Image: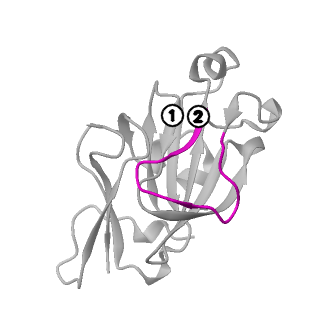
Amino acid sequence: MLIEKQLTKPPENFKKAIPIAAPVSGHCILLQHVNDDLINAGAWGPGMALVTASSKVVSPFNATVVKIDPLDYSIEIKSSFGLKCRIKYGLHTQMLHGAQFLTQLKRGEKIKAGAMLFSVNSAWLKQQGVENICIMTLLNATALLGVLPTHQKFVDAYSDTFITLYI
């Protein structure tokens, strides 16, 4: 588990800070406040979540699609600098069998920052009892000094920094 990589302030010594944009607009919350034991324990690495009403999720950086999982309402992408990221919409979505999850992307496809990763029907998900939350976690954060979540309460997709990586 990589939850220890989650920072509360920038490290004193670092070589580079890399800002990562928000994948969706919404109200920022720390992973430990997400209602899922594995996510808030850091099972998929450090990151952050957004409570959102948006139905479109965009790529926070130039990337290659690594995995698309409609049953889990998630996608994994890898940046040109090696960062692997998992972006998931909703919690406990497996029983919905990927309904209302739409993407045109294929595994191995290269995408630009700001390009749409997938969309969901957020109103329909809410009717199904799924919380409109988008979770972004870093799957391979071991080489990082740490990950600093934004201190902003609300961020806009692709235009605001969501997390900052320190190497």
- Colouring mode (rainbow / by chain / secondary structure / one colour): one colour
Q: Residue 140 location, x and y as percent?
A: 54, 74
- Residue shown at 63% from the left, 62% from the top: 109
Question: Nearest the camera: 90 or 103?
Answer: 103
The disc labelled 1 sits on which kind of residue?
Lys
Secondary-structure class at tag 2: strand
Majority secondary structure of magenta residues: loop
Pick the quarter of the image with the N terminus: bottom right
Q: Residue 52 location, x and y as percent?
A: 44, 29
Disc 2 to disc 1, C-alpha distance: 4 Å
Crowding near pointer 1: few (<14 within 10 Å), some, many (20+)?
Answer: some
Q: Magenta residues, as a range?
A: 103-119
Label whose residue precedes the other's in the sequence (2 or 1): 1
Question: Nearest the camera: 121 or 133?
Answer: 121
Q: Residue 24 location, x and y as percent?
A: 43, 39
Question: Nearest the camera: 108 or 156?
Answer: 108
Q: Residue furthest left?
A: 12
Horizontal side of 82 relative to 6 (left or right) equals: right
CB contact under 8 Å: marks 2 and 1 = yes
Pick the quarter of the image with the C terminus: bottom left
- Residue shown at 57% from the left, 38% from the top: 35
Q: Is residue 45 visible?
A: no
Q: Is residue 134 visible?
A: yes
Please tell me in which quadrant of the rendered image residue 71 appears: top right
Q: Which residue is mark 1?
A: 56
Horizontal side of 27 relative to 141 (left or right) equals: left
- Residue shown at 44% from the left, 63% from the top: 62
Q: Which residue is mark 2?
A: 119
